Amino acid sequence: MMSGEIIACAECDLLQVDTPLAAGSTLRCRRCHAELRRDRAHGPEYALAFTLASAVLLVISNLYPIVGLSLNGNVVQTTLAGSVRMLYEHGTWPLALLVALTTIVTPFLQIVAMLWLLLPLRFGRVPWHAAEGFRLFQLARPWGMTEVLILGLLVALVKLAHIAKVVPGIALWSFIALMLLLAAASAAFDPRETWARITARQHNGRAWVLPPLRRRRGAITAAAQGLVLCEECGLLTRQPRENGKHVCPRCRAPLHSRKPASLSRTWAYLVAAMVLYIPANVLPVMDTSSLFGTQKDTIMSGVVYLWVSGSWPLAVLVFIASIVVPMLKILGLGYLAVTTQFRSQALPGQRTRVYRVIELIGRWSMLDIYVITMLVALVQFQALATIKAGPASIAFGAVVVLTLLAAMAFDPRLIWDALEKNHVRAER
């Protein structure tokens, strides 16, 4: 991206001029303070190195056992794929599919997409079907949850230590390294900078030229200037024709001034999550069978168990991630949807910050799902004890997915549109 270029904020639609950045600094929107651009010195080179290392660690993490459990001479070990298979065999295939997608499939796709784009550029070539590679990256990135998996493994190990001897496997350490390297690769990889490099090679350094901006009062937004920001590659281009299809001239992605049916889709996902939140917390999330009988645990009883056993920091962590965070996401998204539906002009900056927090904490609700996955896979001592996932686990997994989809469907630019319409009326 070239300094002096006109850029649009993805969260409030404000047009502003890109400026040179000092090393390690960040350019933020002057209206909503969203991050517009971050200086990533040697970003593509670092991203490629981290991605190559992540690819090696991903293979190791999925081939070797994560953890083992030893009891009275019986040893049970599991890989991540083995944990998924155990969930499937116990009949909780929706949970098995969710764990497989978020811990195996999406990290793999994210690594493949970054290698697809970065390797050709490293050798001075334009990536083959670059647009498809970027779409694959954008699709996989929100759903890869390696860091949440590591935290879930930690909680599971604490619980398992009260049952039998825990033996950490090679994959546990490789997963920790993978989490760090994949996070570093994502931080170093700048999709807009990568697109700028691809465009420069395709068009011999020529940049996309915007039409002249119209003078008007108040904030100058992309929509008011007849422009639209491509959500895939960040290119500013002419607004799509009303009731007509329009695609980005650079990446061929469909263009929309605002996310289509944003509020309707947000409400649909949110109401479904609210309905499922009740059985997720009332029904048993785990069924434990042992010599002493059968015990059914809810999410709250699991928190109590950690607290009573002396692991109060983990008890607080699980309580926040599994009970407080889903509730806050539902309440926060409801607040945003209601105020936006009624075109409220109050506190737009605060509401935008609420949206950012919801996006930031959304994935951490998956913590309990990964804890259950490990316990089900390892506690399979047929004559002594077995653990199965309860019906609440599927409901809880659905709540997590639905709130994530609701946050993705919500368009924060709608928060600022009520203010923009006031400026339009004032001009008239």
Image (cartoon, helix red, strand yellow):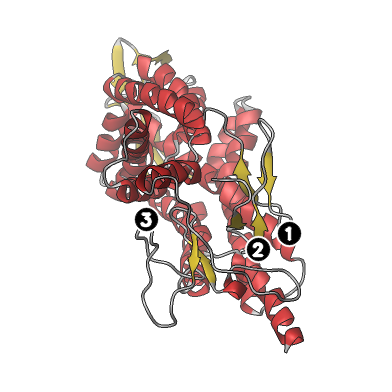
* x and y percentages locating residue 365 in the rendered image: 52, 45
Nearest to N terminus: mark 2 or mark 3: 2
Q: Are marks 2 and 3 in contact (CB under 8 Å)?
A: no
Q: Which mark is residue 251?
A: 3
Residue 105 vertical position relative to residue 123 in the rendered view, above or below: below
Which residue is drawn at the image coordinates 74% and 74% (left, top)? 345
Q: Amino acid at mark 1?
A: Arg
Distance of label 2 from label 3 (alpha carbons) = 22 Å
Q: Label 3 neighbourhood size at 10 Å, few (<14), some (14-19), many (20+)?
A: some
* x and y percentages locating residue 52 in the rendered image: 36, 24
Q: Label 2 neighbourhood size at 10 Å, few (<14), some (14-19), many (20+)?
A: many
Q: Amino acid at mark 3?
A: Cys
SS at badge 1: loop
Q: Amino acid at mark 2?
A: Leu
Q: Which residue is mark 2?
A: 14
For this orientation, the residue located farthest to the left is 89
SS at badge 2: loop
SS at badge 3: loop
Judge left or right: residue 98 versus residue 401.
left
Which residue is drawn at the image coordinates 67% and 69% (left, top)? 416
Q: Which mark is residue 31?
A: 1
Which of the 4 image quadrants contains residue 413? bottom right
* x and y percentages locating residue 26 in the rendered image: 67, 40
